[in-house]
Structure formats: structure tokens, C-alpha cells
Image: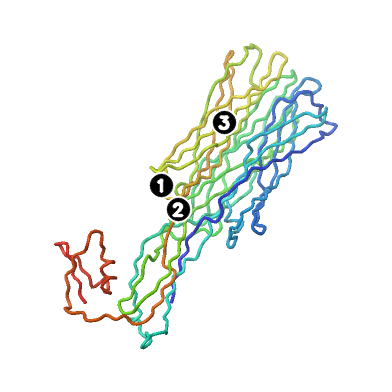
Amino acid sequence: MSTTNELFTVKLDTGMPHEISEDFSLPDYMPEVRRIVSCCASPVPENKYVEGCDVVLSGVVNYTVLYIDCDGKLSAAHLNSEYSANIRCGNTDMTGISRESIVSSTSVTSTSCRAMGPRKLSLGCRLYSKIFSASAYVCRESVNVSSEGRTHSATTADELTLERKKHEAVSSSVTSTRQTGDVSGEVKTHPGTKIIACGGGAGITDVRVGHRDVTVKGEVCLDFITEDTAGDVATLRIKNPIEEIITVGNISTTDREAKNASANIRCAAITVSGGDEGVYTWNMEYDIDVIHTSQRNIEVTDDIYSTKYETETETESLTPIVCLKNSNSRLSVSGTKQVPPNADRHVGHVAGKVTVDRAECSADGKLSLSGSCTVYVVTVGGGEITMEEVNLPVKFDCPCEKSDGMKNVICEASVMYADGRLDGDKLTVNAELCLSLFAYAALKEDHISSCCIDSERELGTRGSCVKIYFPEEGEEMWDIGKKYHCRLEKITRLDNGGTLIVS
């Protein structure tokens, strides 16, 4: 006879940096490049799959290059480059690891852009890809009877009765689900105004877990760089709410389990069309990644003994995963920078990126992360177009569950939108950040994997049918029962500190 339980253990937790670079030739209908103003890059993961002992991540990096053309005007080039990261998992047993069980993230850490000719650009970036997976491990407890040395076989249930010492272990399942969506709208400008470029950001405002799905609410933000008939450059911003209901694979239906979810949204592509009488139609495609966790308590057997027979047990060690935090948060950052004064200069465009350098859980139950947010401000005026960078420190703290053992944090951070304002020689910027937080710990658990019932125990003379035993310091009723081969239900703790044993 045997019993089984599922404990979810960390199978993968690794990452690697990698670089991509590519040369681009601009088509003839685009203006020639005289000077590069700025270059922004964002990764769009498209696929992940298991190949032998490796996990392969692939996608594209979208570049937006703002440059001064041969006529001295601001122009933009939207380019993309494919990437692929082959993450080696060493000697990890890949059994049971599916695409849905892998949580992955890819972020851009640095970008490079060079003009190699009038219509030739060399673009590159350094990326960091991370993977994580928690897979179910079947925790079996089997009991068998050995015939060797037995005077007679154990045939009744009473003879096979075992005393089991159990405790509750916490285990969390983790599922990653992606869903794509799109949203459309119109933007109205003055007749004759043209759109030079369009960038987009998005953020999560609310995540709610249902019985079989997760409802994600968010907001997309589009910044259009426009140029009017007088040659003035400005930014036009559009915000639009979104809502997606995402079916999560293998979601638990047990109401007693603690279920949570966090989500991360990224802009995949933006298209703009029209322009007749200053009316443009836009469409944004986006990806939403949901990390769903379901946490439950599972009984694990620590020890086994029989009152009538000799037993031999084998112990196995596991490291089940415990979810400490799985949620979304918002953070606003701001700062200033002194710039050369110019009365004719104004802010033409603002963009930003955020990098998380450190994320950790403390022993007292606090999740902390720190990093930086770089805000890029394109200023226009006095016949010049320049770009200013403002670096803002990022610090965030929130409570999470307390736990021992190895702790780790997976954090996705993005800039939903950024603003800039010039006041004389002072440039003031602020950015709204969206954080997807998933913190977990791995705790060691020892459990009895098998018990063999062997020869009949020599009980000897029991003497009196009632004994009073005075336990030593730290000695529990389980220790007394195992010492005297007695059922726990036959043991009673007395008020005077003694223990009554009924044989």
C-alpha cells in the first residue's frame, strides 16, 4: 500500500547575458542621416521551448532611432532585429518541464547606435535573459512486508497498523501564461501636421484571480512626435484603458488554496495610418504575461513505527517552493537637471527605461529592490534639436511573507510614461513605473519515502498494564510511544508532568 502527494520544487533558476548587432540600410524614401539624436530599444519575446537540456528563448528587439536629416529636421526610423538565447541548464532533469511551466524574462541593459553612412545604421544591444520553472514532484510513501525471517505473514489490517508522524509542508505551483491583444483609436491633429514617430508604453492597474481565469486591467500610453507646417516639433499623448480575461492553464479549483497572480504587459507593435485632414488611426499590439501561483498545505510523513513489528524506513529530501509575494505595484520617480538656458527651447519628446540592479527578500519579511530610471528628453528650439539624459534612482519596499531558506525575486519593471518640463535652466522630469513582483523561497523537507515491515517484534514481559513515565526535557509523546511500542491513542499526559501509558 502507498500514498502519494505532489510537492512543487524549483527545477530551473538561471540566466545569461547575450548581445546582438545588425547593420541596416534605410530605404531611399527615408531622409538621409546627418546626426543621431537618440536610440531606444525594447525586446519583444515571441517564443520559448525546451530543446534537450537547454531552454531556447527567441524574439525581436524593436529600435526607435531619432535623427537629424539632411534638411535639418527631426526624422525617425523604426527598425527591428531578431534575437535568440540558448540557455544551458547543465545536468538539470528536464522531465516534467513544459513551456507553460517556464517563467522567462528578457531585458535590454545597454544600447548602441552608429551612423555608418547617409542611409546606413549599425545598431546593437546587450540583453539579459532569465528563466525559472517549478515542477511537480510526486512524493510517494510506500509500505511493504518482507517475508524473510517471519514466523507468520501479516494478514489483517490491525497487524499492519502503523503510527505516522506528520506535519504540513507548504508547496506552490507556478504557471506562466501569455496572451496577445490589440487596441485601436484615433488621434486628431491640425491639418497639415504630420506624425514623425510613435512610441508606446503600457502598465497594469489591477489583477484579479477568478475560478478558472485571471482578469488583467491596464492602460496603454502612446506618444506621437508631430511636426506642424511651421516646422515646430511637439509630443501628443493618448491614453486608453484595456482589459483582458486570461484563461490560466492547470489552474486549481480548490477554494482552500491561496491563489495569486501578477502580470507584465509590453508593447509589441504600433501602426499609424491616415492623416487626411489631420485625423490618424492608430493600432497597438501588446503581449501580457501572467504568473499564476497556487499555494497549499500538504501532509508529509516524518516518521513511522509499528507496535508489533520491526520496521525499516528510507528518507528522501526535497526543496518545495513557497510563494512569498506575487503582485503588481506602481512607483513614481522624479528629478531635475541643470541645462544651458535658452528661452526658445521647449520639450519635444520624452521617453524612458528602467533597470533593476538588486531585488531581495530580508529575513524580517520585506521585499526591497533598487535600480535606476533613465529619462531621455528631446528638446527643440533656437534652430537646434538636442537630447538630455536624466538618471533617477529607483527604490521600492513592500511587505512579503517571512520565510527561511533560499530566497529569490523575479521582477519585471517598465516605464508606462514619462514627462518633462523646462523652466529656464531647470529640466524637471518624472516617470510612472510598473512593477511585477514574484518572490519565492525554497525550503528543505525530509519525508519518509518507504517503510518495510520485517520480523515480529520481541516485546518481552509487559508487566503492569498501566505505567507512569516521567519524560526527559524535550521528549514528546511521539518519542515515548516509539520507545515503548505503544499506540499514541493509549498515551495520556498527566498534570504533574508525568505520562500515563496504557499497554
| Residue 235 picture location, percent across and down | 65, 26
Q: Is label 1 in contact with label 3 (beta carbons under 8 Å)? A: no
Label 1 and label 3: CA atoms lie apart by: 28 Å
Q: Amino acid at mark 3?
A: Cys
Q: Amino acid at mark 2?
A: Val
Q: Residues within 10 Å of mark 1 (few under 14, many from 20)?
A: some
Under tag 3, what secondary structure?
strand
Q: Residues within 10 Å of mark 3 (few under 14, many from 20)?
A: many
Label whose residue precedes the other's in the sequence (2 or 1) = 2
| Residue 90 picture location, percent across and down | 61, 55
The structure residue drawn at horizontal position 54% and vertical position 37%, both measured from the top left corner, is 434
- What label does residue 322 carry, if any? 2
Under tag 2, what secondary structure?
strand
Q: Is label 2 in contact with label 1 (beta carbons under 8 Å)? A: yes
| Residue 276 picture location, percent across and down | 76, 31
Residue situated in front as seen by the camera: 62 or 123 = 123
